[in-house]
Image (spheres, coloured by chain):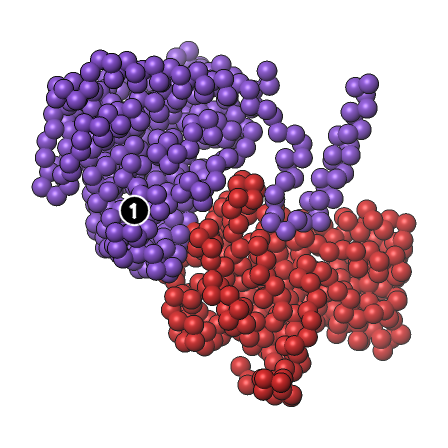
Amino acid sequence: MPSPPQPPADRGQQPPPDQGEAISVGAPTATATPPTAEQVIAGLRATTEGGEDLVQLLTPEGERVHHPQFDIEVTAEDLRGFYRDMVLIRRADREANALQRQGQLGIWVPLLGQEAAQIGAGRAMKPQDMAFPSYREHGVAWCRGIDPTELLGIFRGTDQGSWDPRETGFHLYTIVIGNQCLNAAGYAMGQRFDSRVGDDDGEATIVFFGDGATSQGDVHEGMVWAAVYDAPVVFYCQNNQWAISESVERQSRVPLYQRARGYGFPGIRVDGNDVLACLAVTRWALDECRHGNGPVLIEAFTYRMDAHTTSDDPTRYRLADELEAWKLKDPIERVRVHMVREGMADQDFFDGVQAEADELAARFREFCVNMPDPGPERIFSNVYAEESPVVAAQRDEYLAYHASFAGGEH
Amino acid sequence: MAAPTLDRTTSEGRPATQTVPLGKALNMGLRAAMERDPKVVILGEDVGKLGGVFRITDGLQKDFGEQRVLDTPLAESGIIGTAIGLALRGFRPVCEIQFDGFVFPGFDQIVSQLAKMHYRSQGKLKVPVVVRIPYGGGIGAVEHHSESPESYFAHCAGLKVVTCSNPVDAYWMIQQAIACDDPVMFLEPKRRYWEKAELDTEATPDPLFRSRVVRSGTTATLASYGPMVRTALDAAAAAEEDGYSLEVIDLRTLSPLDLDPVFESVRRTGHLVVVSEAPAESSVTSEIAARVQQECFYSLEAPVLRVTGFDTPYPPSKCEEEYLPDLDRVLDAVDRSLAY
């Protein structure tokens, strides 16, 4: 069995310092310092305030409601498909979390709680569309046909993204917060320059980022560029309430979707735990873009039910009560309840999805523990499209040095 | 900028050899690249209607349209970041950073995304972006308009860094940089924009990533690049009057460095002075000194000496004549090397 990789450098590796008056000076504390009052209020407020503008088609209780602008028709088969998507990607996510705990992954970035936000958006995309993810978009990757095993290399340390972004329409994960918003805006400008915008077959781009990223200059600049060049790009912000330990109140005075007004394009807040609403709003936004009416900002109001990463410790900055409140809004459970109530799925269906999830988890785990470590030549490969003699010389020298030890194996 | 002097014409009636300033040569090179490849687009602040603050893109938007020459919003991270997105879609963007000191808002996109995209995708993604930067001092400018940021980029794996010193190289190198599948930082010696040379657009150019001996000599070697090549050549001309024969090498490429001509020269002369107006510490000149002592240890008659700007911020422009290496400082270093 290969030795587990060391965790990559990450903000989450070291828990952030405590805030304000909660800092205890002197003797080290045996247990984590509790969240500040400010943090608790901010977190609990997020459980009750979606705001009156929140677009919702399926309530947390599984009741189908209607919206004057964004209503869509979905069949029972569609709903069963979304349910299956969400259950399977949650299962892969939980398995990856466990693999990290067992030393098989250096780190994992959980998507728990954000399944609807990602499956809704991912299923709204057409094959010709392009997605620029951050690093938590495992559900969108799933919708783009990327097998969850292909995500593992990044977190095990065997590669930095193994899939082909051009074939899948899904760019590599971007870890520097917000960088991808500009890359997406540029890509979308290219879609327009290539005259691929203007009808039902037009192309569109969607870029994923979080509430914390909205403070980054690149997100602002991406929105400026997209606006002035009429770029067909959907800015899809998953507001999961927490940027590691910082609440949304640390990022903005106004609800995030309202920022779009300042750039001159529509901003919509959608229930990010409602897969139907996410699908409907994203489909509308992508269609606006492909017809030449972009850009659009979507704020998917959701919740990060797990830690920022496996290196994070949320007990230091938020109360368990908050998580319990959000469990009542679970994105998968409301679909299940709705389907049962409406007779859209029977026990055989749920059992089948469960069995499929078990198979996926087993295959995922098997794949992970058998991933080979790259050899030392990997360090030097593909630094440039046109090889650098400097890198080539370093490679040759190091591989010769490395080979000098191989003789000792006789 | 002065109109080019026409000397002779090709069979198609176009002038083949013209006397042009460096800035105009860049303009001609950009035009040739845009004519050759419809995917070449130019992005920058004031590059369209104005033709750039140095007029390097003069007339290009008028002839190629607003979709090929983009007057962008004023944000350098935006220029680089959107150029990356365009490149991912098959375009070959040429970014103009208005002045050296303004590249730093775009530094994150350059080092985090542009430099690493090919590597992290293991060649599945190419980002053939050229970032043009007018750099260096000597024009009496205010702060942030006279800097030499080349070492930051030369230190960054995944980028290639080149700099032209004369109109002929300017014309060819910008076209070669645009044709290169790697990201290229293209540094333009702004104080030399108005220097003229005869340019033959039918000639066969040297490869992009090669340095070149621009003056042969036997007494000592001067290695330089960009704006300081002219200074080194002037020093060599002055030294000749004193009976010294200085060899001058124009490095042209700073990453990857092409030092074989330097090694060959130093093995003959035994003396090397490296000339650059950038600060000395942890710089391109440091790298050259390290590599030369490694490759030419037994040939060296003296330590490698450097004539550079100082390890200070770029000073107020009334001090820049003292800050920038000049002929006398170069010859003083040659004297110290020969007297060692």
Residue appearing at x 47%, y 76% in the figure: B58
Q: Is residue A93 above or below residue B34?
A: above
Number of numbered callouts drawn: 1
Q: Is residue A239 visible?
A: no
Q: Is residue B291 left or right of residue B16?
A: right
| Residue A288: image location, x then y, percent | 23, 51
Q: Residue at x 66, y 53 (%)?
A: B255
Residue B90: x, y in percent? 47, 55
Instruction: Examine the rendering and report whether any part of residue B215 can be seen.
Output: yes
Query: Can you give x and y, in whole percent of width and height, for residue A84 in the image?
Result: 29, 24
Quarter of the image where one finds residue B185: bottom right
Front-most of residues B174 and A304: B174
Kindly identify which residue carries mark 1. Answer: A234
Circle 1 marks a residue in which chain? Answer: A
Q: Nearer the viewer, residue B333 or A201?
A: A201
User: From what the image shows, is residue A340 above or below residue A49?
Assistant: above
Chain B in the picture: what colour?
Answer: red
Measured along the vertical axis of the image, is residue A251 above or below residue A339? below
Nearest the camera: A142 or B207? A142
Q: Secondary structure at mark 1?
A: strand
Name which residue lies at 42% across and 40% down.
A168
Mark 1: amino acid:
Val
Q: Which chain is assigned purple?
A: A
What residue is rendered at 42% in x and 33% in y? A146
Residue B256 rendering spot, x and y as whole percentages = 68, 53
